[in-house]
Image: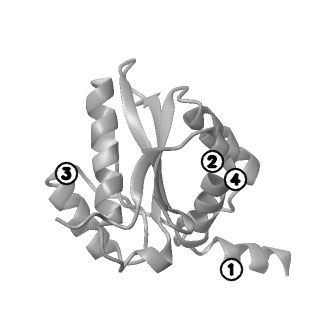
């Protein structure tokens, strides 16, 4: 088996700038509300410190190519912890490349949940290539446990909405 041209690893606080860049790239595509970098950092920093979360990254020769932000939280009806995927993203230039980066990120997520002994909540909230993303998740996690719907919003549409409000 050929060695992939990248390595999967746990991010640290030294990666904060590169992780924030990935998060903002993800928001460009998938956010349906205006991203707030301060709020994003407030989610990312504790995970980089492994405080109720973890960030898995794919590091290639040119830097970070993708990542997953996972936080420990609780669902509204229980005191039991769950591992929540907040974002999973592979940069555009690496999506068609060999190596299965998205699969490595989902594997990292499963291993984190297994290591903590808690369930993982992970899903697809995107209007871009949704069917392909769902197929990948079905291969990795089995049948879906529901679906997301947006009313009055479009993923990736926050820029147009912000420009419209400013005009």
Q: Label 1, secondary structure: give it.
A: helix
Dots 2 and 4: beta carbons under 8 Å?
yes
Give the image location of residue 18, x and y in percent. 64, 56
Residue 121 at x, y percent in the picture: 33, 42
Q: Residue furthest right?
A: 167
The residue carrying mark 2 is 15
Classify residue 107 as left or right of residue 7. left
Who comes first in sequence, dot 3 or dot 2?
2
Up-down relation of residue 12 to residue 164 (above or below): above
Disc 3 from disc 2: Cα separation: 28 Å
**The residue tagged with tag 3: helix, strand or loop?**
helix
- Whether residue 40 appears in this view of the structure is no
Camera-near label (1 vs 4) is 4
Give the spatial CA distance, label 3 vs label 4: 31 Å
Distance in Å between CA atoms under marks 1 and 2: 30 Å
Mark drawn on residue 141 = 3
Picture quarter containing residue 58?
bottom left
In the rendered structure, which disc, 1 or 4, sits on the residue that comes first in sequence? 4
Quadrant placement of the C terminus: bottom right
Mark 4 is surrounded, within 10 Å at the Cα level, by few (under 14), some (14 to 19) or many (20 or more) other residues, namely few
Mark 1 lies on residue = 160
């Amino acid at each position: 088996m050929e060695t992939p041209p990248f390595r999967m690893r746990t991010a640290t606080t030294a990666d904060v700038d590169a992780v924030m860049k990935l998060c903002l790239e993800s928001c460009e595509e998938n956010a349906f509300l205006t991203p707030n970098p301060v709020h994003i950092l407030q989610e990312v920093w504790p995970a980089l410190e492994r405080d109720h979360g973890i960030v898995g990254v794919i590091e290639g020769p040119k830097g970070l190519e993708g990542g997953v932000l996972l936080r420990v939280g609780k669902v509204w009806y229980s005191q039991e912890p769950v591992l929540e995927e907040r974002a999973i993203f592979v940069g555009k230039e690496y999506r068609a490349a060999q190596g299965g980066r998205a699969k490595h990120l989902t594997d990292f997520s499963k291993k984190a949940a297994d290591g903590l002994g808690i369930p993982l909540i992970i899903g697809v909230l995107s209007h871009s290539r949704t069917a392909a993303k769902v197929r990948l998740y079905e291969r990795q996690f089995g049948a879906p446990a529901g679906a997301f719907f947006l009313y009055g919003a479009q993923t990736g549409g926050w820029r147009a909405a912000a420009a419209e409000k400013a005009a």
